[in-house]
Image: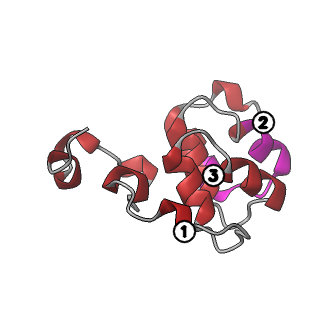
């Protein structure tokens, strides 16, 4: 399957459900944060890929990896994070513009 030709919506679905390590390896490096964030929620995720996502430079991704049931990392460093980082909404439904949490936060 050529993931480079997939739409973002298709990639999000694949990231959430794939059990294919080759696909996971491609998706863990995807330029869009939401694709990596969705992959960090995948119950089938490989431990090595989960560790990579835990060290992702984007807190939204690394937080999701830290709370994954398979995570061996301590997520205490994510205490008191802003609502955007800890948001539990599905990536396919994220529309932050009208989010009450964003409206109440000063960036």
Q: Are marks 2 and 1 in contact (CB under 8 Å)?
A: no
Name the secondary structure under disc 2.
loop
Q: Above or below — where is 57 with respect to 5?
A: below
- Residue extent of the magenta highlight: 14-26
Q: Are marks 2 and 3 in contact (CB under 8 Å)?
A: no
Q: Main secondary structure of the magenta part?
A: helix
What residue sits right under mark 3 in the picture? 39
What residue sits right under mark 1 in the picture? 76
Q: Nearer the viewer, mark 1 or mark 3?
A: 1
Q: Quadrant of residue 65?
A: bottom right
Q: Residue at x 57, y 68 (%)?
A: 67
Q: Is residue 20 left or right of residue 98?
A: right
Task: Give the mark nearer the N terminus: 2 vs 3.
Answer: 2
Q: CA distance from mark 1 to mark 3?
A: 21 Å
Disc 1 residue crowd, few under 14, some 14–19, many 20+, Cα 10 Å: few
Q: Quadrant of residue 90?
A: bottom left
Q: How many marks?
A: 3
């Amino acid at each position: 399957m050529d993931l480079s030709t997939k739409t973002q919506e298709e990639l999000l679905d694949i990231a959430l459900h794939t059990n294919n390590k080759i696909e996971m390896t491609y998706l863990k490096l995807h330029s869009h944060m939401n694709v990596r964030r969705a992959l960090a929620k995948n119950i089938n995720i490989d431990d090595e890929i989960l560790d990579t996502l835990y060290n992702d430079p984007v807190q939204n991704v690394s937080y999701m990896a830290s709370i994954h049931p398979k995570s061996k990392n301590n997520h205490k460093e994510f205490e008191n994070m802003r609502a955007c980082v800890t948001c539990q909404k599905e990536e396919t439904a994220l529309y932050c513009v009208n989010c009450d949490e964003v409206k109440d936060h000063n960036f």
